[in-house]
Amino acid sequence: MTNHALPAARDLVPEIQALREETESQRCIAVAVVERLRQTRLARMAVVQSLGGLETSALDSLDVYETLARAEASVAWVVWNNALPCLFSRFLTPEGRAEIFADPEWLYANSTRPSGKAVATEGGYRVNGRWALVSGCELADWMAFLSVVEENGQPRMPAPGTPEMRFMFVRRDDCRIVDTWYAGGLRGTGSHDVVVEDVFVPEDHAALPGGDSTLDAPIGRVPIISTMGAGFAAQAMGIASAALDTVLELAKTKVSPGPRPDLRDLPANQATFALHEAALGAARTHLRGIVDQIWNKATNAEAISIEDISATWGAVQHANKVSRQIVDAMYGTGGTTSLYTHCPLERAHRDMHAMMRHIIAQPLWLENAGRVRFGLEPEEPLFAL
């Protein structure tokens, strides 16, 4: 399958970089960039071609996320966030999926926090709730919100201690955005709160995570959460690459006052750069190898094992750790120059540490991966989803 997404991402990079300050100051991706995202359908890499998607392989998607994050982390973050509703659409009916993804220029947002309730009613659900950190909500045409399903005034309990939760796909016009995103890192993502008040969601627009996939395609078979984890790590590596690029540029011009060696002449800087550049390459190669294996299994309709997923999570968290270390090291190498907002190292440092607050970067995934390797069952229900 031809990768149309990567050339489109590369073509978009100059415009993204030219409008970085607009994205930063408005706390939302620059309008011109948003229009290009709609036209190129980069936010629909995880949608099948029959519904106007690019149907990009999981491996090729990593290249796109890394390319975009190297230019502007907030753009990559919103594109990546669009993938989750697309992947979860496998749990919709074909009719519901066709309606929600009818227009190839539509964008999406989501929240995996179960901070809403969906009261079962005839033909669907009445949804109420408030969800935080909904990245790209101002740009979205549809949003998917994880909600606890209630019936007869009580949560549905398909298993003891386990309430039923579904993603409710809601049109943007049925949502109210609350301006809450005043943050340092990933400032351009517009990750505001969103409120839904007594909105009817038909059964066809409600997805039950872990149900049977109605999408007979590799995108309908790859594990969802670990695939999203790989995309997350690709963004971290993109930010790390930008930090390395910046230090290379600084090495050409940064002169130390007095008799001290310049940045490029310090042996410690030389060794630090070479070591971290190699570490990034190794982490990238390892992650790509694991993701490629899983995509090939999905393509051939082969079973994807819990061990495969465990290996993915190990590669994801390794790449995240390496990327964070690179950004911190390059930030230190840049000296006082790194403090100034005009220096890309300052933005890379903010963005990286904001990213690492996300649930995907937390230790629980690595802990569960280790449990699997020790012959135990994972404790996190979403680990293998």
Image: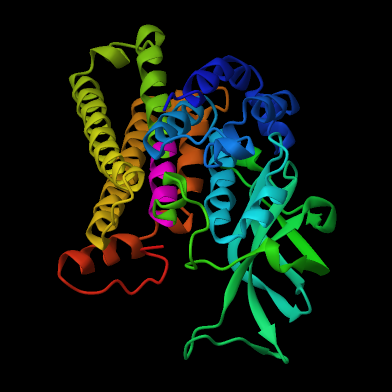
The magenta-colored residue range is: 225-235
**With 13 as the anchor, is 236 left or right in this view?**
left
Residue 74 shows in the view:
no
> Whole-percent x and y of residue 374?
15, 69
Asked if residue 232 lies in the magenta stretch, the reply is yes
Whether 251 is drawn above or below 200: the answer is above
> Whole-percent x and y of residue 326?
32, 34
Question: For this rendering, which residue is in front, 300 or 312?
Answer: 300
**With 238 as the anchor, is 277 left or right in this view?**
left
Residue at point 60%, 69% (across, down): 166
Residue at point 64%, 41% (across, down): 189
> Whole-percent x and y of residue 33?
68, 25
Asked if residue 27 lies in the magenta stretch, the reply is no
Quarter of the figure that contains the N terminus: top left
**In the picture, residue 224 is in which quadrant?**
bottom left
In the rendered image, the residue lying farthest to the top is 252
**With 216 as the anchor, is 306 left or right in this view?**
left
**With 8 as the anchor, is 318 left or right in this view?**
left
**In the picture, residue 235 is in which quadrant?**
top left
Question: For this rendering, which residue is in front, 87 or 182?
Answer: 87
Whether 295 is drawn above or below 269: the answer is below
Characterize the magenta stretch by its predominant secondary structure: helix
Residue at point 57%, 79% (across, down): 164
Colour convention: rainbow
Quarter of the figure that contains the C terminus: bottom left
> Whole-percent x and y of residue 125?
75, 74
Question: For this rendering, which residue is in front, 325 or 67?
Answer: 67
Residue 199 shows in the view:
yes
Whether 251 is drawn above or below 53: the answer is above
